[in-house]
Image (cartoon, rainbow, N blue to C red):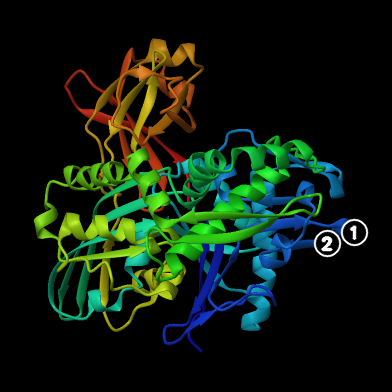
């Protein structure tokens, strides 16, 4: 029997799980109420007597004080915690994610009738290594064997079978617009008979997704349009606040209604100025009717400058690659729930040309399942493929540096390949002494250098403890930095002798992610 690999797309809004054994793909049904399609809401509910629900069953619960949504985005926050009344304790984002993974683990085993499986988990491009590690630890503590964590657009690439069928070179752009982020990946594929080389040339991520669109629709359209009615509902609401965020339940319900209206508008063939209506039931049992048009949403996109931001991100993608420009692109594919909005697909058509990206050529099911599906095929291609010889090269999606005199000093540039090694750089023993031989490692998604270490764009990755006794004879040492394929940062420290020979003192390693 072929090895079973499970791809887990731990999305901000939805959960998707696909199993693949090298021949056949299988959608994992995560609860009995799951409708057509592979996804269920990424929502968890803590009931009494230790009952925990996820997905549709959790979302249907009216008790919002014990229900948590969008935990993936909360993993981005440094010290986020939530008091859960039914279990009478606080939990942090990693603990809650682990509870979700525990239920996923049980459902996967039940669906596949197996006790163990290997998994690949996906994450956004703009997730830091700390956030990546939190997801990995949450899954491992839930009993899931995590073989790798890869970026969402790079995973989606491997779901596109046509890319690997014909000999020659292809330049591919993956546009993944999900619930919490917009991720872009630029990839070169070279196929020569049985040999396939996959080279990620650059990646770009934006912290903007479907959740932000939903909130924007409420704040920019529905609230101004129905201000008197909404103010009345909010003031008369009997609902308590949600303790984790201080938001009224009615506010959250309005944002969810905005999401529902948006999805219905873009899922139907409705004229831009025709109003889609939806009934709203408040906490007092009163019904209200709210309406929204496609044109109002498009006007909001224009007002917020989303088209300009997307074009800027696409331009940055090619600026980060020395090898290709947009005229070299042969295929563009769009994934993620927000990419079903034709406004965004039209931006891609205008940018690349209709012959490269056809805004009308898309499948809803493919949009949602490609990431989990591609994750499994990525692992098969890298580890288990027998028919073809795959060689896969990923890029580092961020800059890496150290703290020097309370400033962030960059050493590895964003979009370098894993395996890249820096030149020799000096370190002063006097400064190491002050820090008790601790070297602090940082990362940034921005192209910055020399900024204050407390700058919000600088993210702490971890400390490396040097062996003090080895450095007693030098005033200055040299070091190199190298990011290994398995997301381990290697630092090598050297002494330069009087005859100019450079001698290794020690190697130190920092495990920073999946």
| Horizontal side of residue 406 vs 499, given as left or right | right
Disc 1 crowd rating (10 Å Cα; few below 14, some 14-19, many 20+) is: few
How far apart are the alpha carbons under marks 1 and 2? 6 Å
Q: Can residue 10 be seen here? A: no
Task: From this view, report whether residue 483 is shown above or below residue 98.
Answer: above
| Horizontal side of residue 114 vs 388, given as left or right | right
Q: Position of residue 240 (x, y in %)?
A: 80, 40
Question: Label 2 near label 1: C-beta < 8 Å?
Answer: yes
Q: Nearer the viewer, residue 98 or 59?
A: 59
| Horizontal side of residue 215 vs 318, given as left or right | right
The disc placed on residue 49 is 1
Numbered marks: total: 2
Q: Secondary structure at mark 1?
A: helix
Residue located 49% across and 16% down the image = 435
Badge 2 is on which residue?
51
Q: Nearer the viewer, residue 361 or 314?
A: 361
The disc placed on residue 237 is none
Q: Can residue 345 be seen here? A: yes
Question: Image quarter for residue 14?
Answer: bottom right
């Amino acid at each position: 029997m072929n090895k079973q690999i499970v791809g887990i797309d731990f999305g901000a809004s939805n959960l998707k799980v696909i199993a693949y054994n090298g021949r056949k793909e299988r959608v994992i049904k995560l609860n009995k109420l799951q409708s057509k399609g592979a996804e269920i809401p990424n929502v968890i509910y803590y009931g009494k007597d230790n009952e925990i629900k996820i997905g549709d069953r959790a979302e249907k619960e009216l008790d919002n004080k014990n229900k948590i949504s969008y935990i993936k985005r909360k993993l981005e926050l440094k010290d986020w915690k939530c008091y859960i009344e039914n279990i009478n304790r606080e939990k942090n984002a990693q603990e809650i994610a682990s509870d979700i993974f525990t239920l996923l683990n049980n459902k996967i085993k039940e669906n596949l009738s197996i006790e163990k499986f290997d998994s690949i988990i996906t994450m956004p491009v703009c997730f830091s290594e700390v956030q990546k590690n939190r997801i990995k630890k949450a899954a491992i503590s839930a009993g899931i064997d995590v073989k790798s964590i890869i970026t969402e657009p790079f995973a989606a690439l491997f779901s596109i079978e046509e890319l690997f069928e014909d000999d020659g070179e292809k330049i591919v752009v993956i546009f993944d617009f999900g619930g919490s982020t917009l991720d872009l990946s630029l990839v070169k594929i070279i196929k020569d008979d049985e040999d396939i080389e996959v080279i990620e040339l650059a990646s770009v991520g934006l912290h903007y997704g479907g959740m932000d669109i939903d909130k924007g629709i409420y704040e920019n359209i529905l609230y101004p349009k129905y201000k008197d009615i909404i103010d009345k509902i909010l003031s008369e609401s009997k609902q308590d606040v949600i303790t984790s965020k201080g938001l009224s339940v009615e506010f959250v319900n309005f944002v969810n209604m905005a999401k529902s209206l948006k999805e219905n508008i873009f899922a139907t063939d409705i004229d831009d100025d025709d109003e889609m209506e939806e009934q709203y039931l408040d906490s007092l049992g009163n019904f209200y009717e709210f309406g929204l048009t496609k044109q109002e949403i498009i006007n909001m996109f224009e007002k917020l400058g989303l088209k300009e931001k997307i074009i800027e991100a696409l331009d940055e993608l090619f600026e980060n690659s020395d090898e290709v420009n947009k005229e070299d692109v042969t295929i563009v594919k769009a994934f993620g729930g927000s990419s079903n909005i034709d406004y965004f697909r039209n931006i891609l058509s205008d940018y690349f040309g209709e012959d490269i990206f056809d805004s009308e050529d898309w499948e809803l099911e493919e949009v949602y399942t490609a990431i989990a599906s591609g994750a499994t095929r990525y692992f098969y291609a890298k580890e288990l493929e027998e028919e073809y010889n795959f060689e896969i090269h990923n890029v580092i999606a961020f800059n890496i540096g150290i703290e020097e005199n309370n400033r962030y000093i960059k050493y590895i540039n964003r979009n370098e390949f894993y395996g890249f090694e820096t030149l020799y750089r000096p370190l002063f023993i006097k400064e190491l002494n002050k820090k008790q031989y601790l070297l602090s490692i940082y990362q940034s998604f921005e192209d910055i250098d020399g900024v204050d270490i407390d700058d919000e764009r600088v993210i702490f990755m971890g400390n490396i403890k040097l062996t003090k006794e080895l450095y007693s004879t030098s005033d200055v040492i040299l070091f190199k930095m190298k990011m290994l394929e398995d997301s381990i940062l290697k630092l090598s420290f050297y002494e330069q002798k009087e005859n100019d020979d450079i001698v290794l003192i020690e190697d130190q390693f920092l495990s920073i992610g999946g």
